Amino acid sequence: MTADIIAPLPIDRLRQSFQTAEPFPFIVIDDFLEAAFAREVAAAYPTFETALQQGFSFNFVNERKKVQVTDVSRFPDPVKRLNEAIASQPFLDQLSEITNIPKLLADPELVGGGMHVTGPHGRLDVHVDFNFIPERKLHRRLNILIYLNPTWEADWGGAVELWDRDVRHCHHALAPRLNRCVIFQTSETSFHGVQAVRCPEGVERRSFAAYYYTREPPPRWNGTTHSTIFRARPDERLRGYVLMPAERLQRELQEGLRRVRRGVGRRVRRLVTGR
């Protein structure tokens, strides 16, 4: 499955890069997919307006003008193939070699992942991700982001930023160029965000995201679980002191409702299928 989709990976070099990266373990793989397939996936992506009809739209203080499509049945065929490839056991085995995290699991429900389409004036504040799915007792360990923008100008913003643990210094700002893949360890200090998107009308920032889990907790886990935690950048005092706390409550309420709906959906499927 992966041979004709994902380009050969230099495992040893990537392992060394992952282990020595700052401010937290991560790697960047340019030309991640075979070139022809990357162009095929990019061409199959929906417009912002089409994605709005298919998925969930984020219009919060922390995250706005972004649409997330997690329903695999709505994926165009090239996107389905991409999703299958990065969830395949051969690719999981390679990730384990690179990151030294054994027994990695893909998420068939793509919670928080899938096709992401962000329009002009979109943003995603600096944050660390939720660390646990209680319904399935899964610990989140890795993020993978694959960028699918045929053209992206530097002054359009939209770079993914990797920050230090105190959110005082941005160590890296990685442009979302076509066929770039960023993989990083999910932890209590893996603060990351997206620069404000300033692309012209009619252009979208496109990416595919997936997350990997283990049933075993990460080393030195203290038993604390949490949802997404946002932090203000150093020049965003108003957001940090006023806007973010108010939105945190709203998001927690909405996430609680989504979890209830997901639980009901799983129970209905078990009743229908007997599994």
Image: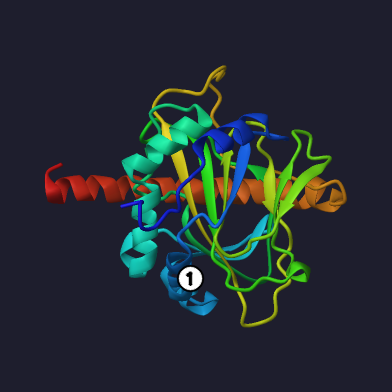
Percent position of residue 63, x then y? 64, 58
Picture residue at 34% right of the left edge, 41% below the top: 90
Judge whether residue 133 can be spotted in this image.
no
Picture residue at 62% right of the left edge, 39% below the top: 26
Label 1 residue SS: helix
Percent position of residue 207, x then y? 54, 61
Up-down: is 115 above or below 88?
Answer: below
Task: Indicate the quadrant containing the C terminus: top left, top right, bottom left or bottom right.
Answer: top left
The extreme left residue here reads 274
Instruction: Give, as a three-letter code, the residue at label 1.
Output: Arg
Rendering quarter of residue 149: bottom right
Picture residue at 64% right of the left edge, 31% below the top: 188
Judge whether residue 234 can be spotted in this image.
yes
The extreme bottom residue here reads 202
Q: Which residue is mark 1?
A: 39
Percent position of residue 103, x then y? 38, 28
Compare residues 254 and 22 and report the one nearer the observer: 22
